[in-house]
Amino acid sequence: MNLRRLKFFVTVAEELHFGRAAERLCMTQPPLSQAILALEEELSVTLFKRTKRNVALTPVGEHLLSHVSKLLQEVEALPGLARQLARGEIGSLKLGFVTTADYNLLPELISHYGATFPEVKVTLKEMTSDLQVEALMQGDINAGLIIPLHQTLHTSLSYLPLLHEPLVAAVPEEWVRAGRVEIVNGRLKIQDVAEEPLVLFPRRSAPAFHDIITTYFASNGIEPVIGQEAIQMQTIISLVSAGMGFALVPGSLRRLGRMGVRYVGLEGKPPVIETGLVWRKEDPSPTVLRLVEIARGLGEQTGEEGGGTGEGLDGGLGGGAPGVGLPEAALVHARRDLNGHGHAGRLD
C-alpha cells in the first residue's frame, strides 16, 4: 500500500476540490488525479464522485476516510514511538520478586518506577530465587528481586545488591507474658530459645534463606528444633501467632502486624539477609536498563541520608543506612499493583 497515495486521498477528501488539494500538497493537479485513480484501481473501489462542477466522496470513501486518517496519524507517530521505546519510556517489564521483598524493596521500587515511566506495563510475579534465575535464563521474566546464592549465579546474569537487613526473632506474645522467653533491653539471646520449636521453611523451597538461619544456629553451637515448616512468610507468622514456635525473619516483617506476635532484635551479631536485583547481561530491553538505574539511584539516595539502624537500601555496601520504612503512599500504590498477580509463591 502506497502511503503517499493515502495522504493524497485524505487531502482531496478534506478539500473536495482537486485544485485546492494540489496546492496544499505543493504539486500540480494532473499527477494528483492520476494518483487517486491509481489508488481506486488498487483498492478496486470508487472513492470520489466527480462532475465538472464538484467532487464528493462516495459512501465507501466516507467510511474509508476515518480509517485512513487514523492510519496516517499512527504512521506519523512512529518515529516518536520508536524513540520512546529506545528510551524505555513505554513498553513492558516482567519482574519477579521474593516474598520478603514485598515488605521492603518492592513497594518503593515499583512506586518510583511507575511514577517515572507510567506508560510501561509492569507485570509482577512472586517466585523463589532459584525459579527467578531459571525464568531469567528462559526469557520468561526481565528482572528479579532475589536472595542470592552467589556461587550458583550464572555468569550470563548481572546482579546489583540493594538491601542488607538483620533478621529478628518473631516470638509468640504469650511466651513473653508467661516468661517463657526473656527479653533484655529489647534483645533476645538465641541460646535462650535453643530448645524452643523453630518455625522454618523447607530448604527445597528457600535454600538461601534456610542456610542463613541454620548457619547462624550452628555458629552459636545450637542444633535447631524444627517444630513446623511453611512455604509462605504470612503462614510462618500465623504459626508464631498461634504459639506453634518462634521464627527468624527480616526486620522489615515488622510491617506484617499480627496479633499475638512480638518482633524482637537478636543480641550480638544477628544474621543479615541480602536482597538484590538480577537481570540478563545481554537483555536488550531499555525498560530493564531504566529499572536498574532507578534501583541503583534508590540505593545511592538512601546511603547518602546516612545514620540509622543498619537496615535499608544501601547499594550493597552494608551498614549506616536508615531503616526500611517506606512512604505509606508507596506501599498502597505497590499493593494495588500486586493485586491479581498472585501471592502463592514461596519465601526465597
Image (tube, rainbow, N blue to C red):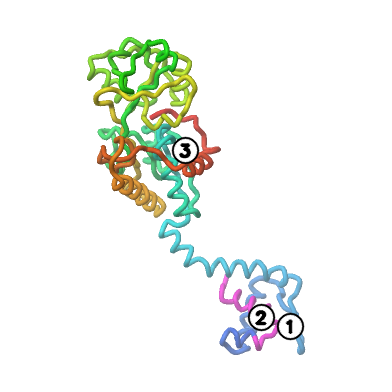
Mark 1 and mark 2 residues within 8 Å of each other at the beta carbon: yes
**Residue 145 x/y as whole percent:** 38, 39
The span picked out in magenta is 1-20
**Residue tagged 2:** 12
The reply to whether dot 3 and dot 1 touch (C-beta < 8 Å) is: no
**Few, some or many C-alpha atoms within 10 Å of disc 1 (few <14, some 14-19, many ≥20)?**
some
Residue 156 seen in the current view? no
Report the side of 257 relative to 304 (left or right). Answer: right
In the depicted structure, whether residue 250 falls above or below residue 37 = above
The residue lying at 43 percent from left, 63 percent from top is 83
- Quarter of the picture containing the C terminus is top left
- Point out residue 196 in the picture as x, y percentages from the top left corner: 35, 11
From mark 3 to mark 1, how far is it between C-alphas?
58 Å
Confirm whether the magenta stretch covers residue 17.
yes
- Of callouts 1 and 2, which one flags the residue occurring earlier in the amino acid sequence? 2
| Image coordinates for residue 187, horizontal then vertical, percent | 31, 22
Q: Name the residue under label 1.
A: 55
Is the residue marked by circle 3 packed among few (<14), some (14-19), or many (20+) residues within 10 Å? many
**Dot 3 corresponds to which residue?**
125
Q: Main secondary structure of the magenta part?
A: helix
In this rendering, the label closer to the viewer, 3 or 1: 3
Badge 3 marks a residue whose secondary structure is: strand
Amino acid of disc 2: Val
